[in-house]
Amino acid sequence: MGLDIYWFLPSSGDSRYLGKTKYGRLVSNEYLSQVAVAADTLGYEGILIPTGVGCEDPWVTAATLAPVTRRLQLLVAFRPSLLLPGVAARMAASLDRASGGRLQVNIVPGGDAAELAADGVKLSHDERYEEADEFLTIWKALLSGERLDHHGKHFDLTAARSIFAPVQKPYPPVYFGGSSPAAHELAARHVDTYLTWGEPPDAVAAKIKDVRARAAERGRTLRVGVRLHVIVRETEAEAWNAADELISRLDDATVAKAQAHFAAMDSEGQRRMAALHKGRREKLEISRNLWAGVGLVRGGAGTSLVGDPDTVAARLKEYADLGVDNFILSGYPHLEEAYRFAELVFPLLPGKRRESTEGVSFTGGPFDAVLQDAIKVSQS
């Protein structure tokens, strides 16, 4: 079996550099559509559409991408604290139907407590996961066709139902990521795919073991995904130079401000990300080819696999050997890097499409046919 490789939608904007730069790309639906169509045509299985105050609304964005993509799974992230479960069930059913059964959802209970408070959510860390547990119980039941009375701590519903059924049965697949004990319990009870950020393999293995053991106690199994950035070039030297270039515009004041903000968050996953580099640039390679430079200023996923195609493919396979089924990848800028990763690494991964152009001459001119052999496409 092959690995499921997803890409990431930069719905907060995009750039060639982290930090302040005049080379950034402001977010627009046209650009997001370009990224999604590229991922679709290149053979990525899906695309993660993030949530947060700094992002375009993920539901509306996904709805605009459904008509311009054909096979791409639309993984919509959202915070259960900001939606009633019945409303979210209707939204999910509608988008799943409109996309021909291509919706997946990524539940995000945690993150930045200050951001949540600005939206009126003032629950503690563990209360947010408690609420998400109740939310998913209702959401899944409604999408499965149940009529429901529910009188809980966070939600009170009488004769609830969702009239229009989703294409996918019993409901669109549920993704979720979290590193705390409360998060692992939620994953074990409810989710189809558990996500972790790109920590060193030993740390990822420990999380997988714990979450799958908790799920097994409930008679459940779940898939595992890893969220990572990638910096792949034809040679190792070029890749590490590109990593250095990505943070070359970062000043110390910007790094310090970002790290202070992350330190104030109650997210266990963010704490673990920050601990990998401690806000310092001295040793950013925290494991073989795993580089923590992105996490100097970016919240959430803060690590990248850096290297030539064979090396990056080997590191991905090492995670796969631990039990990882799915990777959600990204790179700066996201449009160009979607092409670069697919061209350089897809041929080295099991189950991915291989396009062989060996021996074919490309000049960009209208009379190339006399120089070209047939381009062979095969399935690995």
Image (tube, helix red, strand yellow):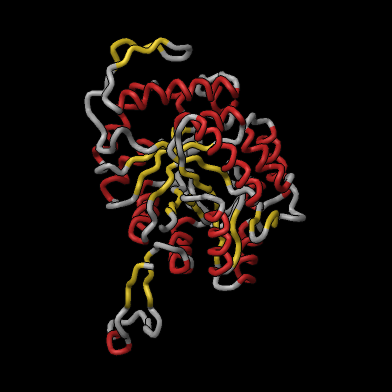
x, y percent for residue 280: 75, 49
Q: Is residue 379 left or right of residue 201?
A: left
Q: Is residue 328 left or right of residue 99?
A: right
Q: Residue at x 61, y 46 (%)?
A: 204
Q: Residue at x 41, y 57 (%)?
A: 1
- The quadrant in which residue 298 appears is top right
x, y percent for residue 215: 50, 34
Choose between 164 and 144: the one closer to the eye: 144
Choose between 187 and 7: the one closer to the eye: 187
Q: Residue lying furthest bottom in this view?
A: 370
Q: Residue at x 31, y 30 (%)?
A: 91
- The quadrant in which residue 171 appears is top left
Q: Residue lying furthest right in this view?
A: 282
x, y percent for residue 303: 61, 51
Q: Is residue 274 left or right of residue 43?
A: right
Q: Residue lying furthest left in this view?
A: 164
x, y percent for residue 117: 56, 22
In this rendering, the answer to whether 177 lies above or below 36 is above
